[in-house]
Image: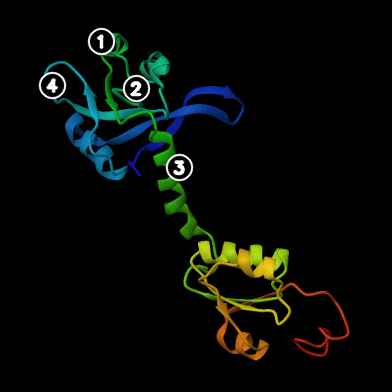
Amino acid sequence: LLDIKDTTYLTQTSENHGIGRVGDIMPQTIEELALKVKAVFGLDSVRLVRYDHDNPLVSRVAICGGSGQGFYKDALKKGAQVFITGDVYYHTGQEMITNGLLAIDPGHHIEALFIAKIAEKKKKAFAGTELSGKKLGVIGLGAIGVLVANVATHLGMEVYGYDPYVSVDSAWRLSRSIHHATTVDEIYKECDYITIHVPALDSTKGMINKAA
């Protein structure tokens, strides 16, 4: 997201685990990097910890979610010129810049924003079909069928429900956005996916085909 290359842990807590990251970026001014952080995470503003209006070039950055100011000495040890972390206190900020470390403070909840951005970026690497906008047919609207149907609507699916014997209680719990199918044939014709929640009785056997 911030084009940080050749990263390593800011602080390693155990084998293959650690806190934060340190890595290299293309040389840019601290103000350019701050604007990038603001844009990438959709923030209204960020706070710069620096002397007056100094705007030096930086090429090595450390980043830590939450309030990571306690790890600023680790950032210095690993050669970072700027530390991106939240809730930097005034006195800690003064210590940082006295020791030659600048900081960009995007707020405490940067880790939540970062996780959301990473998930958005990485999901494209996984094969599969986007469910949003697809049509789901739910045959059988008992307790489980109603639950599945309602969850599917929250996933952005258009849901068709079929159950000629639906109970009053289930009907009350069913989302109003669900289409009421009058026949299973309507489900078969309209839907991209079908989920079946009926007991295996003589009356339900062969509902799909001879094998089911």
First in residue order: circle 3 vs circle 4: 4
123 w.r.t. 192: above or below:
above
Q: Which mark is residue 94?
A: 1
Q: Residue at x 48, y 66 (%)?
A: 156
Q: Residue 115 carries which label?
A: 3
Q: Tell me, what colour scheme is on the image?
A: rainbow
Tell me the quadrant of the picture where the C terminus can be found: bottom right
Marks 2 and 1 sit apart, C-alpha to C-alpha, by 13 Å
Three-letter amino acid code of the residue under disc 1:
Gln
Q: Badge 2 is on which residue?
A: 87
- Residue 116 versus residue 171: which sits nearer the camera? 171
Q: Which residue is drawn at 42% across and 17% down?
A: 71
Q: Badge 4 is on which residue?
A: 54
Disc number lying in front (2 or 1) = 2
First in residue order: circle 3 vs circle 1: 1
Mark 3 element type:
helix
Residue contact at pointers 3 and 1, CB within 8 angstroms: no
136 w.r.t. 35: above or below:
below
Marks 4 and 1 sit apart, C-alpha to C-alpha, by 14 Å
Residue contact at pointers 4 and 1, CB within 8 angstroms: no
Disc number lying in front (3 or 4) = 3
- In the image, taking residue 111 as reference, residue 186 lies left or right, namely right
